[in-house]
Image (cartoon, rainbow, N blue to C red):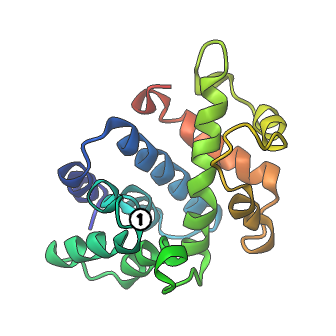
Amino acid sequence: MNIEEARKLLHLHMQNTNLRRHCYSVAAVMRALACHFNEDEDVWEVVGLLHDGDYEEVKKDPSQHTLLMHKWLVEAGEKDERIFSAILSHNFVHTGKNPPKNKLEWSLYCCDELTGLIVAVALVRPDKKLSSVTVESVQKKWGKSEFAAGVDRNQIAKCEEILGIKLPEFIGIALSSMQSISSELGL
């Protein structure tokens, strides 16, 4: 599946603008991480685009999250096991199956929550723009557990232990990639 096809599949099943923007954010970060690791940037971006693509339809039953997207991918003729595995690993906390096992899957796990934190930091800036967010401003909010309290910082911090990327660098990769699509994110 190419990026255009993935975007069409996402738009077919996800109508909420903010949820779409979250998927765009994760896709941009995943592409940047693929570049960092010298991996297939298109595959990683597709995974980022589609990781939450079934959320609107399964939000009342988290155990079904990613399973519906997997079904849609099969129906669309997708055959790339990397995409299937990464999508399914995204919800291992609720399904108890398919824990992340490689850089693609762990990158998705670590960056998903980080995109939300970065957006939250942007939204408290006077101009509400990603361009005024810095790695330092994200790190400053990182230590304030009451700020963006729903963001699992432990999940993000696994970037050091599992991916071998220090947290400030990981934040920098994510921030830069999100800033590069800021108009698409409305920030």
Quadrant hosting residue 49:
bottom left
Q: Secondary structure at mark 1?
A: helix
Q: Residue at x 27, y 58 (%)?
A: 6
Q: Residue at x 75, y 37 (%)?
A: 138
In this rendering, is residue 47 above or below 132?
A: below
User: For this view, does 127 lie left or right of residue 142?
Assistant: left
Q: Residue furthest top?
A: 126
On the image, numbered disc 1 is attached to which residue? 47
User: Residue 165: x percent and y percent?
Assistant: 77, 63
User: Residue 144: x percent and y percent?
Assistant: 82, 39
In this rendering, is residue 64 above or below 123?
A: below
The amino acid pointed to by label 1 is Val
In this rendering, is residue 172 above or below 109?
A: above
Of 176 and 124, the residue lying toward us: 124
Of 26 and 96, the residue lying toward us: 96
In this rendering, is residue 16 above or below 167?
A: above
Q: Quadrant of the N terminus?
A: bottom left
User: For this view, does 152 lie left or right of residue 35?
Assistant: right
Q: Residues within 10 Å of mark 1 (few under 14, many from 20)?
A: many
